[in-house]
């Protein structure tokens, strides 16, 4: 069977035909629908002080993008330049 893959924009799991027998609901809910909901309405708070904050992480198509959430809140006291 072919392996599951990830969508190219936000990293949702794309199940290959015939994969995940008796587990497709768990995978669909946790890796696709929750990811889609975060992209549409999600928010995340990130602590910042200085240095570099890399939001690329493991970007699609290998995982969910770190910059996925619709609202990004950056809070903290800057002690150095942040990029």
Image: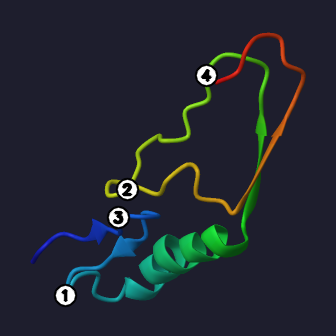
Q: Are marks 1 and 2 in contact (CB under 8 Å)?
A: no
Quarter of the image containing the C terminus?
A: top right
SS assignment at label 2 = loop
Q: Are marks 3 and 2 in contact (CB under 8 Å)?
A: yes
* Category of crowding for the residue at label 2, using alpha-carbon neighbours closer than 10 angstroms: few (below 14), some (14–19), many (at least 20): some
Left or right of 14? Residue 34 is right
* Category of crowding for the residue at label 1, using alpha-carbon neighbours closer than 10 angstroms: few (below 14), some (14–19), many (at least 20): few
Q: CA distance from mark 1 to mark 2?
A: 20 Å
Q: CA distance from mark 2 to mark 4?
A: 21 Å
Which label number is shown at residue 52? Answer: 4
Which label number is shown at residue 8? Answer: 3
Left or right of 62? Residue 57 is right
Left or right of 40? Residue 27 is left
Reading the chain from its start, which is encountered first: label 1 or label 2?
1
Along the line of sight, the residue nearer the viewer: 53 or 33: 53
Which label number is shown at residue 76? Answer: none
> What residue is shown at x 55% (from left), y 70% (from top)?
35
Of tags 1 and 4, which is closer to the observer? 4
Please provide percent x and percent y for residue 56: 48, 41
Of tags 3 and 1, which is closer to the observer? 3
Left or right of 15? Residue 31 is right
Report which residue position mark 1 lands on. Answer: 17
Along the line of sight, the residue nearer the viewer: 47 or 3: 47
Which label number is shown at residue 60? Answer: 2
> What residue is shown at x 62% (from left), y 29% (from top)?
53
């Amino acid at each position: 069977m072919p392996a599951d893959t990830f969508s190219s924009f936000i990293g949702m799991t794309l199940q290959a035909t015939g994969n995940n027998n008796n587990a497709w609901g768990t995978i669909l809910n946790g890796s696709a629908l929750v990811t889609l909901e975060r992209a549409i309405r999600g928010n995340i708070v990130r602590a910042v002080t200085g240095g570099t904050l890399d939001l690329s992480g493991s970007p699609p198509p290998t995982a969910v993008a770190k910059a996925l959430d619709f609202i990004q809140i950056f809070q903290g006291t800057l002690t150095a330049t942040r990029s």
